[in-house]
Each structure stands twice: as C-alpha cells, then as structure tokens.
Image (spheres, rainbow, N blue to C red):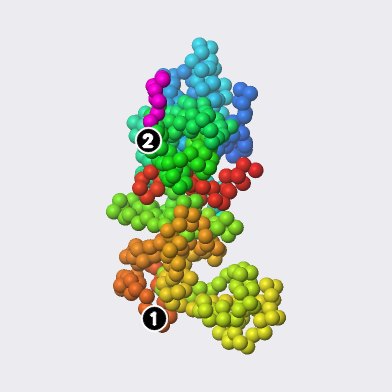
Amino acid sequence: MTKRNYIVLGVIGGVIVLVIILLSVFGKRMFGHNKDKALTLLQASQKISLNGSNEAINNRGLIEQYYRLYDYTAQWSGSETQNSKRRASLFALLDQANLLGLCGSDFHRTYLSHYDSLAHLKDFDATAFETENELVFNDAALSFFFETAYGQPIGHLSFEGVKYKIDTLRVLNLFHEFISQQAPQRTLDSLEPQNANYKKLKSELNRFNAVNYSLAFSNTVVIKDNAAGNVAAIQQLIAYNLLSKPNHGEMIAIDEYKAALISFQKMVDVDTTGKLDVSTRAALSVPLSKRVEEIKKSLNFWRWTNRLEDKEFIFVNTASARLQIISPDSLVNLNMKVIVGKHDTRTPSFTAYITQVITYPYWTVPRGIAVKEMLPKILKKRSYLDENNLQVINTRWETVDPSTIAWFKLSKNNFPYTIRQSTGCDNSLGLMKFDLNSPFSIYLHDTDAPGLFGKKERHLSHGCVRLEKPKELARFILDRGPDTLLIPRIDSCMKDQKPNEFKLKKRVPVLLLYMIADIDETGHLKFYKDVYSVEAEEQK
C-alpha cells in the first residue's frame, strides 16, 4: 500500500472519528441517549431538580408509555418557533384549569412560565437540563389531560368493587394530536365527561368564578338578624346571581328580595319561608369560596366515573338521599328519593355490583340492632316478637320457639341467636331486596314505611338504602336480565310467598358517593347539608 493510500485511509478514519464525535454531541437521539436518560430519571428520581426548583413528576407511567410509543423528542425546549407555539398552546389549556374545577398549581404552572420567559432570552442555553425540562413539560400536559378525563382518586371510598377501564392509549394519542397542533381545544372537549350533571355543575362553577364581591368569598361573613344583616344578605344573593345588582341609589323591592330568598332556600335545601330565618342566615354565611370548592369536588367525582368499565350505572348520592340512573342513553330517566343511614349509622361510600334481586326477602336483623334495640324490647314485652313477625334462629339456623328460651339469662354479650323477620307486606325490606357484592351488610331494598319519603330529612336508616320506587328499579335491572316474567309479579303484594332469588346475567354497577354540591331532579344546582360532618373531618 502506497503512502498516499495510508494518508487517504487516515483522513477517512479521522472523518469517521469526527462524525462519531459530532453525532455524540449533536445527534444524541440517534443513539437513544436522551431517551435512556429520561427513562433513568423517571425510574430513579422522586423529583426533578433544576434551576433551584424541585418538581415532582406525577405521571411517570404515562410519560414512559409515551416515550416507548412515540420515542423521545425535544418538543418544548428552546426558542424554536414550533416549540414556542406548543408552550403557548399548553399555557392556554392550563389557564382553563380553574374553569374545569382543576388546580393549575398541580401542573407545574409556575415553573413552566418561568422557563418560557427564560427561553425567549437571546443567550438562553436550551441544551442545559433539556431532558429534565422536557419531563416537566410532558408531565404537566399529560397530567392535565389525564385528570380532565379521569379525575383524581376519591379518598373516602371504603370499598371499590366495580371494574375500571382507564384508556391511557386514548390519552396518549390525544396528547400526540395536541403536540402536533391539531385542534387543541377539541382535544380537551373530547376528554371531559358528557354527563349532563357534570356540564351543569361546570356552568355553575364558571358563574361563581365570575363573582368579584369580597364579602361573598370572605371566610368571616356572618349574616345577622338586623338591618346590616339584610344588607349583607342582599350582597350574598347578588353574588349567587339570584338578585340583580341595583344601580346607585336604587332600592330593591320587597317582593324581589323575598323571591330571591326563596330561590336561595331551594338551592341550599332549607324550608322555603321567604324570610331571613336562622337556617337561611346560616346558609348565607357560608362563603362562596367554600361553595366553589364543593362544586369542584363534585366535578372531580363525575370525571372519576369515566374510569368505570360500565358507562351506565346506578348513582346514590348519600348527601342528597337520592338515586338516579346515569346512562349514555338519554331515554333512561329514573330518579327517586331514598332513605340512607343516620349520622351515627352512616351509609358508607363505596362501589359495588347488584348481583341478584330477591323478592319477598327475609330480613336478617344485624346483630347490633338485635342486641341493642330489640332485646330490651323483648325482655320488656314477650309479644314484641309476634307483633313484628320476628323469628328466633339458633346457630344451626333452625327456628326456635321463643317460649322455650330463658330470656332473662340473655344479654348483649350473651346472645347465641339470630333474629329474622318473616316475609310479607309488612317486612322491613318490603317486597324486594337488591343484593350488593360488598363487604358491608348494605343493600338497596323496598320498605314497609313509604310515608318517610315525604320527609325533607331522609337520613334515617341503620345504613341500608330504602327505595321510593323499588319496582321501577327492578324493571330497569330485569329488562337487562334473565327473567322479565318477574315484572308483572312485583306489581302487588301476594300472600304466603317464599324468598325467590333472581341472578343477573349482567351485573349492574352501583356507586354510593357523598356529594354535597349536585344537580337535582329538576336540573338545578343544590348544596346539601353535611349530615355526616365529612367536611369538618377533612379539615382536622
């Protein structure tokens, strides 16, 4: 080989080395360097530390999935026009967080704005901490999309028995559309729930967000029974948009003021007296900032329901003591009053399936009720059992003659029996019972005391849910089940019936949630009393 050939080979080798060096510096993506660094950071770090800030990454799994699906690309960093446009579009979406009932600070909003202001400076070095910045921007966007679609987990659920179906691929694909600048607002709209209650609550939230009265949002406002109290009440009613703000020097008509009070009383579920009474003053003294938070919490509940595998479900709001069917089919319109647990015997918040319908059920009395409430009555009056159609069952599940029992030897700590109420029209469970696959002795059922549904306060039970319209609910369930021949048989009470179990081919989801702000059966916003003191407990 000639000297010239050696020189050529040397030059070529030098070029190759130079290319490799250049690629290692400027072409990191080709060798997956930045992608590997990003994945390593996601797996190793609880927080991303940069520029004196520690940013917690909330959706590591989604970011990893996105990188594996679409590979790593720097999409936010630097002053490039396309990346700058993406940041501007993201900021426009994040600025809507409050309108959706979300918290903008959950999505790195302060850090992102600071970075954007630096990125426009002439000497800004976009390569410094590029991977870390990309992670924070991607986390902000993906977290926002995910939370818009599926909400945050509900903390007070005692049991989650229904199946979820969270479509992360849908979120990732919509995020990729957004990155590609394809109709960003449409992307957001497609993520939100289409539920009518959600849309109405969001509309009400935005109406409240437009209020600028400092008194309305003050945490110290107290409406008193005096002239000053009337002025404060008027300001609150104006803030609730129930009374028009008068021009300077104008007086508000008495009839107008009374009508506004009645509208407010309906909204907060107190007696509609049209007067500034004790209950009304207390409700008006609740600052709007608290009402806004209650609406936001309810909006999150509805977004959370997007996680359910079944889009049609039974929803029981234990705060309002109402049941409704939530269905994509607008033709399904079942809404009824229910009776739920008292403060001391709360109906827990949980999700489960109705697994079967039982007609003419026995009522097996919970042990606590049997020994604390019934045993003293039996000891006082032996005929109590017959008068209430109650049976005594031993440990072998055999019926025992009450006259053979030495009742005076029994106590709440020594009671080896079960009390059961026989079937019939006067059974406490009524004509039917809807079993739930939960760890609680909680179910939906008919009642032998329908007059209680006329009460405004319906937190009266030991925990189970009594139904105002059990036959209508049975029809809804059994129309989708195995035995539609049952429907005519539940229209009247027949004598001497034994319990009959009807298994369902398709389990029906039931959600029992505690939602203080809700849309009532007439389509209007309502704030219900915190009967279970949940808000007070959350503040501890």
> In this view of the protein, which residue sits in the foreground, 327 or 235?
235
State left or right for residue 361 relative to residue 490: right
Q: Identify the residue at image location x=43%, y=80%.
A: 498
Q: Is residue 211 visible?
A: yes
Rendered view: 468 above or below 494: above
For discs 1 and 2, the disc positioned in front in the rendered view: 2
Magenta-highlighted residues: 246-253
> In this view of the protein, which residue sits in the foreground, 156 or 251?
251
Give the residue type at disc 1.
Answer: Lys
Prevailing secondary structure of the magenta residues? loop
Q: Quadrant of residue 366?
A: bottom right
Give the residue type at disc 2.
Answer: Asp
Horizontal and vertical percent position of residue 172: 43, 39
Q: Quadrant of residue 394?
A: bottom right
CA separation in Å, label 1 and label 2: 56 Å
Q: Earlier in the sequence, mark 1 or mark 2?
A: 2
Residue 252 covered by magenta stretch? yes
Horizontal and vertical percent position of residue 90: 44, 28
Q: Which residue is mark 2?
A: 255
Q: Which residue is mark 1?
A: 495
Q: Residue furthest top?
A: 122
Horizontal and vertical percent position of residue 57: 56, 35
Q: Identify the residue at image location x=40%, y=45%.
A: 519
Q: Identify the residue at image location x=35%, y=47%.
A: 522
Q: Identify the residue at image location x=60%, y=58%.
A: 344
The secondary element bearing badge 2 is classed as: helix
> In this view of the protein, which residue sits in the foreground, 382 or 536?
382
